[in-house]
Image (cartoon, helix red, strand yellow):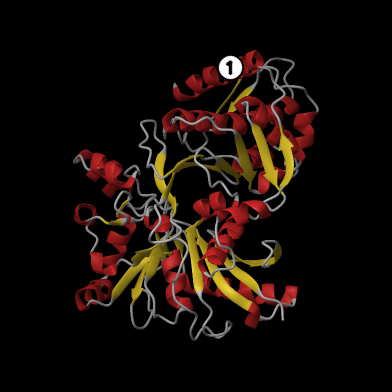
Amino acid sequence: MREFILAIDQGTTGSTALAMGLDGRIIDRATVTFPQHYPKPGWVEHDLGELWSSVQGAVGQLFEKSKLDARGVLCIGITNQRETSAVWHQKTGEVVSKAIVWQCRRTASRCAEMKQAGGEPLVQQRTGLVLDPYFSATKLALLSQQNASARRWLKQGHLRGGTIDTYLTYRLTGGAEHLTDVSNAARTSLLNIHSLSWDDELLELFGVDKSILPEIRPSSGSFGITKGVGWLPDGIPITGIAGDQQAALFGQTCFKPGTAKCTFGTGSFILMNTGSRAVPSQSGLLTTVAWQLGAAKKPIYALEGGAFLCGAAVDWVRDSLGIIKKSSDIEGLAASVSSSDGVDFVPALTGLGAPHWDPDARGTITGLTRGSTAAHIARATLDAIALQNADILRVMEQESGRRLSDLRVDGGACVNNLLMQIQSDVLGRTLIRPTQTETTGAGASYLAGLGCGIWSDESELASIWAVDERFAPALRKPQREQRVMQWQRALKQTRAH
């Protein structure tokens, strides 16, 4: 019977189960999607029963297609969509309402009130985050007071809450454990990232009762054992947990300060390891806990920034402009010209994210001439994805005081070789695409493997990680600077609208 690590990657639209062998190679994976619920404009919810069923379905499909025996699971790693929040009854597991998803904006007015009252400096100083409904604190405050059942359970001491990792651990252990790891706790706006404890002033500020919150543990170690799940044997240890983007950073083996990864998805998520120092940002980046590998070890911190539209910009070109039939067509169309020939597309279709944080910015296409073609717009779209990321990474270099040696890439769009080359060109750094691009699930597996003793330290994991392809910058410095200046002019026009 083959022994392996089981990773559960619980995402926004689906759950993935992944099996990793003891050699650190991914054996197989399976994904099951589940519905999203939109009860009002700007509101996004998940039904926890549907979410849990998707996890069960993904694990079941994984075992069936790979012919793996569930009795071979040595340990479990969990990685999850981060700020999504839920509350439930400690003893029965009954929920008072659907989970509030990280994308949900229903608490925006509450955040605006808190900002106006001067609450943001305290939040930023203690948590490294901006005061925004994206994070969990206002979600948990609302859920714990949402209806009579929640208020009664809270008064009786039975109400429990947290992020999705906490809910999965509760279900996997038969209700025995109420735990989270430092990386997920750091996304709640309730964790003091310097002391790694729930902050009493923040709890009072947001109106969250400390009794509903889970115990915080290192990202690698003991999180209980499976019990009464039915589709998994009892007694399997859960030994690794991390939020999805921190797990991807770990899965890319970015263990040294100054190493960074970019996940090219619907948007782009960029994290840079800053070592044992929590670097405060003056430019709208987030300071967050990346991981902690044991109670006796110092936490590792990261700077984080993201562009709202990456793959979604390509989708807009496909769906709204109709110049490509499927997203993958953009590479060939963009490659048919040597440059955008002065055309710039700033995809601020939902505002601009880091480091600009301008929700009122609107998308623009500039520099059009009589000779501009669909190919130039396609090329400008790939340029825009890369240039947005370069803006974020330059700020990270400045604030961390570290020069990026290379950028490790993953996510669906990293298979676009032209985009990877453009990203290298405008950044002026080498890009590295690994052979194993399932970095989120790999990170959860690595953390679990460390937690149960399969590997002894990060150096063993670094030897597993392997390069698929490197993309070295082909643009000379003057050409790069000229392209960046053109982009900055386009950004100014976008933000003037």
Image quarter of residue 75: bottom right
Rendered position, 273 above or below 15: above
For mark 1, give the secondary structure.
Answer: helix
Task: Give the percent coordinates (x, y) of residue 312.
Answer: 60, 42
Task: Give the percent coordinates (x, y) of residue 161.
Answer: 34, 68
Image quarter of residue 431: top right
Task: Give the percent coordinates (x, y) of residue 469.
Answer: 74, 41
Foreground residue among 398 and 451: 451
> Looking at the image, which residue is at 51% across and 66% down?
451
Q: Is residue 93 visible?
A: yes
Q: Is residue 330 visible?
A: no
The residue that label 1 is drawn on is 486
Foreground residue among 209 and 18: 18
From the image, which quarter does the N terminus lie in? Answer: bottom right
Total tally of numbered discs in the picture = 1
Image quarter of residue 369: top right
From the image, which quarter does the C terminus lie in? Answer: top left
What amino acid type should be assigned to the residue bearing mark 1?
Answer: Gln
Q: For this view, does 163 lie left or right of residue 68?
A: left
> Looking at the image, which residue is at 61% across and 70% down?
5
Rendered position, 20 above or below 317: below
Task: Give the percent coordinates (x, y) of residue 224.
Answer: 44, 76
> Looking at the image, which residue is at 65% across and 39% down?
314
Q: For this view, does 133 lie left or right of residue 488?
A: left
> Looking at the image, which residue is at 37% across and 53% down?
186
Label 1 neighbour load within 10 Å: few <14, some 14-19, many 20+: some
